[in-house]
Image (spheres, grey):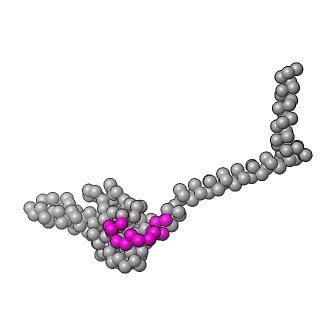
Amino acid sequence: MGDHYGTLGLQRDATKAEVKAAFRRHALRDHPDRHAQSDDPGARADAARRFRQASDAYHVLSDDRRRAEYDLRLRFSSAYGRTSSSTWASSSASSGYGYGHGHRGASWRRPPPGRGGASVGYDWGLLLKAMTRRRFLLNLGFSSILLSGAAFLDGSILELWNMNNSGKSFEEAMESIEKVKTGKGNG
């Protein structure tokens, strides 16, 4: 599979309306229902394949987040000398027909060594994407609040102890409590 922009015949700066119009043209031309009566099974299969490609391209390019991820992958793949986005396109292939429904989505995992392009180094784009997700940032903020609250409580408890028990250490206070307990138990 090739480039999603090339599949729909679009430039990379195409608007959402242009993406939708291009997909509609391809859907009207290649929809499997339109070719169901064809006697040539090869033509039906070819039309179904083209429709799936157009559907996948529309699924990615019509959503702002998925399009930004796709554009980012295209930029990284061209920066590393790869000329095709086929590894991303094949991982985002859908099952069945439709307008993006039943789409399996792209994998966050990198391809294993020896498959799908350069596997040397670390994919910093994926790390940055994972670290800027709302769920990660909320968890980071919540854990920092808990950690700072625990540090504040630890320091304030020590200050309260020192204010109320001047001259005594904690160990000395515990020893005096034990003496009082054993004295009352014997009496």
Residue 71: in sight, yes or no? no
Q: Position of residue 167 (x, y in %)?
A: 90, 46
Secondary structure mostly taken by the magenta-highlighted segment of the chain: loop
As drawn, is 98 to the left or to the right of 124? left
Q: Quadrant of residue 179?
A: top right
Which quarter shows the N terminus?
bottom left
185 to 139, vertically: above or below: above
Give the camera-side residue of 158 and 146.
158
Give the camera-side residue of 47 and 183.
183
Give the camera-side residue of 41 and 83.
83
144 to 28, vertically: above or below: above
Q: Quadrant of residue 14?
A: bottom left
Q: Position of residue 86 (x, y in %)?
A: 31, 70
As drawn, is 148 to the left or to the right of 172? left
Q: Position of residue 107 (x, y in %)?
A: 38, 60
> Which residue sits furthest left?
39
Q: Position of residue 52 (x, y in %)?
A: 26, 63
Residue at x-position 88% and y-position 20%: 187
Residue at x-position 86% and y-position 47%: 162
Q: How many labels does the image show?
A: 0
Q: In which quarter of the image is residue 4?
A: bottom left
Residue 41: in sight, yes or no? yes
Residue at x-position 34% and y-position 71%: 117
As drawn, is 110 to the left or to the right of 179? left
Residue at x-position 30% and y-position 59%: 94
Quick check: is 63 in the magenta stretch? no
Give the camera-side residue of 37 and 6.
6
**Which region shows up in magenta?**
113-127
> Which residue sits furthest right?
167
